[in-house]
């Protein structure tokens, strides 16, 4: 992809709650990721009315070969700019959805901010923790869109409403396959059902700066021994797991 203004991306996260790295992964990389994810869920399928999504948490327990994709330098550099720190992988996961079996929402409105907000509200210079999800098949009407409620860094985190409603000010994220979305854990978001019959592959992680050791309820393991060989060839992945 063309050169990316990482400072502008970090500013997007501060002023809108999220940024997009369009086509951060090539078509070939997306095909590889789809293959890995399909194999990871193969013995837990098929999808059904009762099981419209099959999840892998931690992803590396199911598919250690997905790990090198997390270490891509552009993506890690963008997260470092957002966090203003070296980047630590705190959670890895994936989900594969089947639109044909889903309700109106692939996932309901939610946030991942799980810490107490201090008296007087948030007073942050940067997000303490972010997500970076890889939309292997993109996000849009056919495959199923990510929908977000844009926010400034220290806006309150209160929900606008309960349930699976259309929220005033919501924004539908339309991006091509292989794009990443980096977002503040305080960003409200949901996934809506798409019109296509295809599978929607989504993977990614939660990240904190290495100087922020605060535990979070969604932390999980990236200590699988199968990752050693991948870390040997991906300095970016090693840094995410072992530190700078
Ligand atoms: Fe989420």
Image (spheres, rainbow, N blue to C red):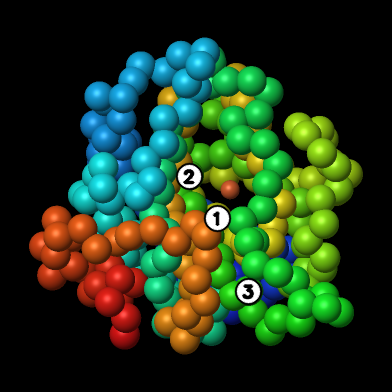
Residue beneath the point at 57% across and 20% down = 102
Near mark 1 (Cα within 10 A), the count class, few <14, some 14-19 or many ≥20, is many
* Callout 1 secondary element: strand
Residue 229: percent from the left, percent from the top?
11, 62
Q: CA distance from mark 2 to mark 3?
A: 22 Å
Near mark 2 (Cα within 10 A), the count class, few <14, some 14-19 or many ≥20, is many
Give the numbered dot on residue 244.
Answer: none
Q: CA distance from mark 1 to mark 2?
A: 8 Å
Q: Position of 61 compared to 57: left or right? A: left
Q: Could you say which is closer to the camera, residue 155 or residue 217?
A: 217
Residue beneath the point at 34% across and 72% down = 240
Identify residue for label 3: 127
> Could you tell which of marks 3 and 1 lies nearer the N-terminus?
3
Identify residue for label 2: 135
Residue beneath the point at 59% across and 75% down = 128
Identify residue for label 1: 181
Ligand 1 within 8 Å of disc 3? The answer is: no
- Quarter holding the N terminus is bottom left
Point out the frontmost of discs 3 and 1: 3
């Amino acid at each position: 992809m063309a050169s990316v203004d990482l400072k502008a991306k970090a500013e997007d996260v501060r002023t809108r709650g999220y940024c997009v790295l369009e086509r951060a992964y090539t078509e070939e990389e997306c095909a590889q990721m789809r293959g890995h994810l399909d194999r990871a869920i193969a013995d837990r399928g098929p999808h059904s009315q009762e099981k419209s999504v099959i999840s892998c948490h931690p992803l590396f327990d199911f598919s250690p070969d997905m790990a090198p994709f997390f270490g891509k330098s552009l993506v890690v550099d963008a997260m470092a700019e957002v966090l203003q720190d070296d980047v630590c992988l705190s959670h890895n996961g994936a989900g594969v959805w089947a639109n044909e079996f889903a309700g109106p929402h692939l996932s309901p409105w939610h946030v991942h901010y799980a810490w107490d907000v201090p008296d007087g509200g948030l007073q942050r210079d940067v997000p303490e923790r972010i997500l970076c999800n890889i939309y292997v098949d993109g996000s849009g009407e056919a495959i199923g869109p990510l929908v977000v409620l844009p926010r400034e860094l220290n806006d309150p985190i209160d929900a606008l409403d309960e349930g699976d409603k259309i929220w005033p000010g919501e924004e539908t994220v339309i991006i091509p396959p292989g794009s990443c979305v980096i977002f503040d854990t305080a960003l409200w978001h949901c996934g809506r059902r798409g019109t296509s019959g295809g599978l929607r592959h989504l993977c990614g992680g939660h990240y904190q700066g290495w100087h922020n050791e605060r535990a979070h309820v969604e932390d999980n393991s990236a200590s699988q021994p199968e990752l050693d060989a991948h870390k040997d060839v991906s300095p970016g992945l090693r840094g995410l797991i072992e530190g700078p």
